[in-house]
């Protein structure tokens, strides 16, 4: 019944987690869900108000621009200049997205031919691999290891793989490891991609979820990055807008144009009212982001303290709202079945995630502390 490409896909990780969670809830279990990275905090009021006003304007009810409203693209470019230190032409170097996930899935369709290799970091967001498979490409994972600060070893890639490589997906601050990368790494990526004629795609969805004074840099700030790369940004985590489906891509104008060609053939753009809300998010003072980060930082500290007390070696992350922890074999299943706690098994992000578990900081401190108490009662 289904196409070969669909039959070749594994079950989507987060859909499987939701199914397991719902089964427990149906049985009456009090589940603490620290699995999927979906903020539990509401979208900030000034963003909602901008949307409400825009929805009432009949002018927003027609087809939107494929590339995005000029005002939205200008707001995105200004945001990039102000907070990431990069100069972007809103007319040619910005593209609105229906969330950054769809861009990850569509980018291979624009640049990958059957048999081309797509490099991606693993453990990583499952769509890097899935989008590659949809385009007929060959996914090639680059393992992220603790001993290398969860950065990929670009020198380890065989020459025959490099000759067929067309794209490189990477993501810092990283999901799921919460690792960060500095400009020296980004500069190395630029040199690597230029040498081997590879398009660099940096997924920067978590850049504003930062703690302890850390500021996540833009890959496009590296010298020469605009020649070979693009960067994806998302409103989802920064502004608690996961359900709104809004983001933007910035970078090399030819790459942006290529992604735009795919999108113009498969979707009709982002609803203008949502873009207007997105403009309010980007253009307003970012106090709301700082306040949200303080909440996540408190949750981070509570979970780190609890896991450390249990004997697990976990470092407080400087960014994202994830805790990546090494755990005993079978720990994830025990958590769900015996403690009613949902967390994401590291192997769900690829083979390189074996032996780890990802906790999302998507519940109040009180519930996180309760989860810790439940875990302490388990036999590790």
Image (cartoon, rainbow, N blue to C red):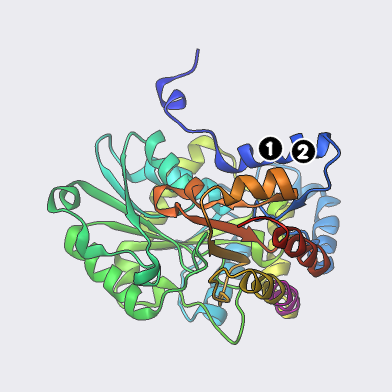
What residue sits 60% from the left and 64% below the top?
322
Foreground residue among 269 and 129: 129
* 10 up-or-down from 288: above or below: above
Span of residues in magenta: 289-299
**Residue identified by numbered label 2:** 24
Left or right position of 252 against 32: left
> Crowding near pointer 1: few (<14 within 10 Å), some, many (20+)?
some
The answer to whether marks 2 and 1 mark residues whose Cβ atoms lie closer than 8 Å is yes
Foreground residue among 311 and 247: 311
Residue 326 is situated, as x and y percent measured from the top left of the image, at 51, 62
Distance in Å between CA atoms under marks 2 and 1? 7 Å
What residue sits 34% from the left and 57% below the top?
143
Residue 12 is situated, as x and y percent measured from the top left of the image, at 55, 37
Badge 1 marks a residue whose secondary structure is helix
* 90 up-or-down from 294: above or below: above
* 317 up-or-down from 169: above or below: below
Left or right position of 205 against 198: right
């Amino acid at each position: 019944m289904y196409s070969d490409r669909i039959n070749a896909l594994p079950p989507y990780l987060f859909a499987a987690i939701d199914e397991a969670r719902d089964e427990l809830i149906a049985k009456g279990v009090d589940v603490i869900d620290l699995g999927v990275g979906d903020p539990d905090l509401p979208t900030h009021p000034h963003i909602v108000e901008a949307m409400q006003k825009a929805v009432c304007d009949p002018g927003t009810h027609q087809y939107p621009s494929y590339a995005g409203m000029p005002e939205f693209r200008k707001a995105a470019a200004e945001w990039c200049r102000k907070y990431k230190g990069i100069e972007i032409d809103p007319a040619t170097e910005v593209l609105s997205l229906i969330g950054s996930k769809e861009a990850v899935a569509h980018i291979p369709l624009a640049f990958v031919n059957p048999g081309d290799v797509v490099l991606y970091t693993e453990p990583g967001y499952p769509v890097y691999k899935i989008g590659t498979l949809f385009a007929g490409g060959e996914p090639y994972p680059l393992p992220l290891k603790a001993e290398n600060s969860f950065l990929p070893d670009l020198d380890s890639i065989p020459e025959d793989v490099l000759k067929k490589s067309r794209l490189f997906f990477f993501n810092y601050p990283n999901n799921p490891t919460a690792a960060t990368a500095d400009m020296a790494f980004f500069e190395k990526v630029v040199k690597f991609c230029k040498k081997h004629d590879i398009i660099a795609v940096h997924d920067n969805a978590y850049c504003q979820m930062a703690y302890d004074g850390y500021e996540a840099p833009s890959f496009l700030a590296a010298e020469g990055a605009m020649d070979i790369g693009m960067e994806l940004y998302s409103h989802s985590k920064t502004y608690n807008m996961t359900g709104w489906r809004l983001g933007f891509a910035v970078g090399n104008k030819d790459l942006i144009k290529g992604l735009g060609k795919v999108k113009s053939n498969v979707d009709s753009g982002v609803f203008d009212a949502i873009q207007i809300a997105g403009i309010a998010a980007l253009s307003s003072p970012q106090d709301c982001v700082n306040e949200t980060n303080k909440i996540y930082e408190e949750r981070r500290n509570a979970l780190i303290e609890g896991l450390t007390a249990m004997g697990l070696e976990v470092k407080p992350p400087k960014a994202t709202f994830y805790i990546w922890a090494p755990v005993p074999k079978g720990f994830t299943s025990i958590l769900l079945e015996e403690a009613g706690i949902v967390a994401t098994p590291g192997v769900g992000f690829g083979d390189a995630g074996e032996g780890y578990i990802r906790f999302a900081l998507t519940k109040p401190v009180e519930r996180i502390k309760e989860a810790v108490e439940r875990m302490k009662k388990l036999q590790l």
